[in-house]
Image (cartoon, grey):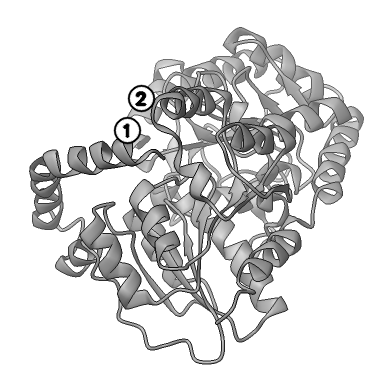
Amino acid sequence: MKPAAHALYTAALYLFSPALAVYYAFKVRKRRMGFAGMAERFGGAPALPPAGGESRLWLHAVSLGEMGVAAILVRALKEKRPGLRIVLSTVTETGREAAFRIPGVEAAFYLPFDFPFAVRRALGRVRPDGLALIETELWPNLIRLAGEGGIPVAVVNGRLSERSFRGHRRFAALAGSPAEELSGVAAREERDARRFEALGARRVLVTGNLKYDAPLPAGSGAGARSHGFEAGDAVIVAGSTHPGEEAAVAKAVRALRSRHPSLGLLLAPRRLQRADEAEAALRAEGLTPVRWSAWSKEGRPAPDRVVLLDVMGKLAGAYEGAALAFIGGSLIPHGGQNPIEAARWGVPAVFGPHMQNFAEVAEALVRQGGAIQVEGPFALEMAFETWLSDPAARARAGGAARDVVEANQGAAARTADFLLRLLEKPR
């Protein structure tokens, strides 16, 4: 990033700092963040002792989804170097809570704001030997100041959608890019690698998508059938849905019930704050959902075979035993959610045209017969019917989906090797 552009960026941060202070003061007042969390955002990370004879790696995962990637990577790193010290940072409350549950983590804290004073303070307190940013977290001051301190900075599981790339490229043409100052990039896919290189990144490797290496949820064995459905029900799990998608799925399910009367629907909105909105959309289409947070205490099948999964951390395991899955964020221009969560259970998926966030995964699933990509909401009914009416074809599709996952595993080990090589610098 060019010096003049970097100075303007930092000046803009300070210009907007009063609004930022008001926003976070409101969060503290509403008890969405404690004073300790507020201090961490201004560089007050835990003061850690020197790492001694080992290295300390700082991993940053912006939110809960990326923290799942961090958990996979932490496990792989610890298998290769048990003594490695690992700290985690995040931006969201749910991400911070998840960080504390990852075994082998020395400390977890909020990422400091990108003010130079906050970044310097955090670096001085954490004392990292390396910094790894998960996916696309290109913070200019964090990258520059770490580099100036002799700390290598890398992006891992790196991804850049076409839309994000266009924005970064326009900015880079005028001001340069923080990617130029990275020590390396471990990209998810070939197209991501080429985009990072176009922004000026050096030492770019394709190590694969860490999400393929996610372990099956602990305590699995019931899945969709344990969420208010009976043994003979064919259940569609609609995961991580966005506005407008609940209505589209509900219309398809209601139409299909004339031919498949025992068809069930387990729907999980992407954000739990939208539970009321999602429930209203289902009811407007003639379905009568129950909320799992309340119905799980009943211990009986849901009366209309429609369950709204309104609790955190249950979706990944709920795909087990489903007849098929709908992948949310794909009927609208959001970029799609993670289809690997369903595929690893051998559950075929249906998704819309907008799967840019998982482009190569989606293409592989469709190519191998483990998924159907539809052009819009009106095609959902036909896509669901393809597999509901032919259990043998559905089983073959599920096997193909699982094969795609198994064929692409190993990214965690490759990424861990990449980071451990990065840490092999003069001490």
Check disc 1 and report the residue beneath it. Answer: 276
Q: How many marks?
A: 2
The answer to whether 321 is drawn above or below residue 75 in the figure is above
Q: Is residue 114 visible?
A: yes
Instruction: Name the residue located 46 percent from the left edge and 24 percent from the top edge.
Output: 173
**SS for tag 2?**
helix
Q: Residue drawn at (68%, 65%), measured in percent from left and top?
A: 416
Residue 153 image offset from top left, x and y in percent: 51, 59
Local crowd size for mark 2, using a 10 Å CA cut-off: few (<14), some (14–19), many (≥20): some
Q: Position of residue 96 (x, y in %)?
A: 37, 62
Who is closer to the viewer here, 353 or 305? 353
Residue 368, position in %: x, y? 88, 30
Q: Residue at x 74, y 55 (%)?
A: 411
Tell me the amino acid under the disc marked 2.
Ala
- Quarter holding the C terminus is bottom right
Classify the position of the N terminus by image quarter. Answer: top left
Residue 69, placed above or below residue 6: below
How many angstroms separate mark 2 from mark 1 (CA)? 6 Å
User: Is residue 303 toward the left or the right of residue 30 in the image?
Assistant: right
Q: Nearer the viewer, residue 143 or 400?
A: 143
Residue 361 spot, x, y in % from top left: 73, 35
- State whether residue 340 is above or below residue 393: below
- Where is mark 2, residue-wise? 280
In the rendered image, which quarter is residue 108 located in?
bottom left
Q: With 244 as the anchor, is 273 left or right in this view? A: left
Helix, strand or loop at label 1? It is: helix
241 lies above or below 406: above
Residue 270: which quarter of the image?
top left
Foreground of the two, 16 or 65: 16
Q: Are marks 2 and 1 in contact (CB under 8 Å)?
A: yes
Q: Nearer the viewer, residue 390 or 17?
A: 17
